[in-house]
Amino acid sequence: MNEAQYHAQLDNLMMHLEEILDAAESDLDYVTSGGLMTITCESGVQLVVSRQAPLLQLWLASPAGGMRFVFDEAVSTWFQDDETAASFAHVMGHILARFADEELDCSSLDG
């Protein structure tokens, strides 16, 4: 994947993530700036989704820790860069359930 394709994939992912956050019943605020999305939950907990263009990675920071994701072009999905290899949609759904206290369908973030 080249850098233009990387940014196109992340633009699409961020657009879907914004739609999910806008549809939430809880008060989830988000700000996007410079390739970084900061999500603030009602409880004040912040989650940060960031682009790491030099590495062609997507990063997620939360009180549960930092996670790195790499894109699998064969299935058009971001997967965690560790032994779990969980998809970004799966991880984001769990993180939002835990810290926003709301079950959100994040499946559109995959493929």
Image (cartoon, rainbow, N blue to C red):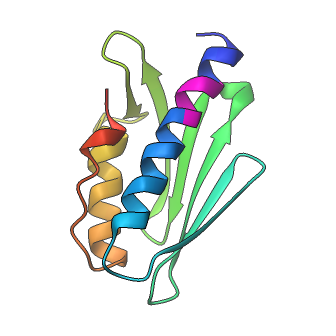
- Quarter of the image with the N terminus is top right
Whether residue 68 appears in this view of the structure is no
Asked where in the image residue 10 lies, by quadrant, the reply is: top right
Q: Residue at x 61, y 22 (%)?
A: 6
Q: Position of residue 52 (x, y in %)?
A: 68, 37
Q: Quadrant of the C terminus?
A: top left
Q: Viewed as shown, does residue 98 lie left or right of 78?
A: left
Residue 9: in magenta span: yes
Between 22 and 70, the one nearer to me in the picture: 22
The span picked out in magenta is 7-11
Q: Which residue of the protein is positioned furthest toward the right in this rendering?
A: 34
Left or right of 19 on screen, residue 35: right
Determine which quarter of the picture holds residue 77.
top left
Relative horizontal placement of residue 53, taking residue 95 as reference (left or right): right
> 50 above or below 23?
above
Q: What residue do we see at 51% from left, 34% from top?
A: 12
- Residue under the point 58% across and 32% down: 57
Left or right: residue 14 compared with residue 31: left
Quarter-wise, where is residue 88 in the image? top left
**Percent from the top left, x then y, of residue 100?**
35, 77
Q: Residue at x 31, y 35 (%)?
A: 83
Would you say the magenta stretch is mainly helix, strand or loop?
Answer: helix
Task: Pinpoint residue 61: horizontal percent, then vertical percent.
Answer: 54, 59
Residue 31 visible, this orientation: yes
The answer to if 10 sits in the magenta stretch is yes
* Spot occupied by residue 23 in the image (x, y as percentages of width and height): 35, 65
56 in relation to 95, above or below: above
Question: Is the residue 37 above or below the residue 75 in the image?
Answer: below
